Every structure is written in C-alpha cells, then in structure tokens.
Image (cartoon, grey):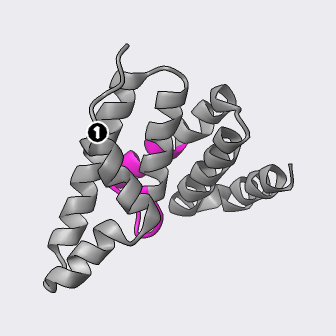
Amino acid sequence: ASAHREAQAAVAIAASVPGVRAYALGTLAKVLLVQGRADEALAPATEAMRIVESLGGLEEGEPIVRLCHAEVLRAVGDEAGAQAALLVARERLLARAAKIKDPLRRASLLASVPEHARTMALSEAPAAPQ
C-alpha cells in the first residue's frame, strides 16, 4: 500500500514534466501489477506509453515503461498487444545497444540490466496461446 501511495504521489508531482510523468506512471502501473491489480494498471501504463511515443522516447526509464506496458497488456489478456509492445521494446533496446562500441559493454547493457534482460527474454519467447 505504501508503494502505491508513493507512486501516486510521484505521478502528481511530475505532472508538469512529461518524461518524468511517464516514468512515474510506469512505476505506478508496475506497483499495481505486482499487487495483482492488472485492470487498474492498464490506464497508467497506457498513458505512460502515450507520453513516451509523443516524445519520441525518454532519456531515462523508457525500457522500464515499455516492459511494464507489455506485462500489463499480457496480464489483462491482450497477448497480441503484449507481443507487439515487446518487439518494439526490443528494437529500441537493440538500437541503444548499437550505439555502444565496446562489445562487452553492449552485451552487458542487454543482459545485466534486469528490465533489459527480461525484455529480451520475453520478446524472444513464443507468444502464449490465445
């Protein structure tokens, strides 16, 4: 309950800074999802993605927002939407990684950051049957 209140407060505080608001909304959606409240998580996850798309991406937190959106879509039964979201999230991660010249650092970005590794794994897994 405390995490939920704190995430809601962050969303309110970040109202005037779109990129920060998207990250806060993604965090709120993740908290709701972890609490088993996927239906309630859908609105903040969707709003966060609208902001990300309107800005053309985020400096910080975009992979987290994209992963959370996909996980919420999956949790509410939209497997096709989840897979499409995961593929875009994967493409964005690979594009970021491609900018890193050092192959070890590039691999580390994809494998060592938990949300990046989860995005890669989920985007490579076969879609669940409808």
Residue 110 position by quadrant? bottom left
The amino acid pointed to by label 1 is Ala
- Decide whether the magenta segment is chiefly helix, strand or loop: helix
Between 60 and 51, the one nearer to me in the picture: 60
Residue 77 lies, with reference to residue 117, above or below; the image says above
Outermost bottom residue: 102
Residue 29 position by quadrant? top right
Q: Which residues are magenta?
A: 48-63
Residue 107 position, x and y percent, is: 23, 73
Instruction: Report whether 91 appears left or right of 60.
Output: left
Q: Which residue is mark 1?
A: 125
The residue located at (29%, 43%) in the rendering is 123
Residue 127 position, x and y percent, is: 31, 28
Instruction: Report whether 43 appears left or right of 121.
Output: right
The residue located at (55%, 23%) in the rendering is 76
Outermost top residue: 130
Between 76 and 53, the one nearer to me in the picture: 76
Residue 87 position by quadrant? top left
- Quarter of the image with the C terminus in it: top left
The residue located at (69%, 48%) in the rendering is 31
Residue 14 lies, with reference to residue 49, above or below; the image says below
In the rendered image, is residue 17 in sight? yes
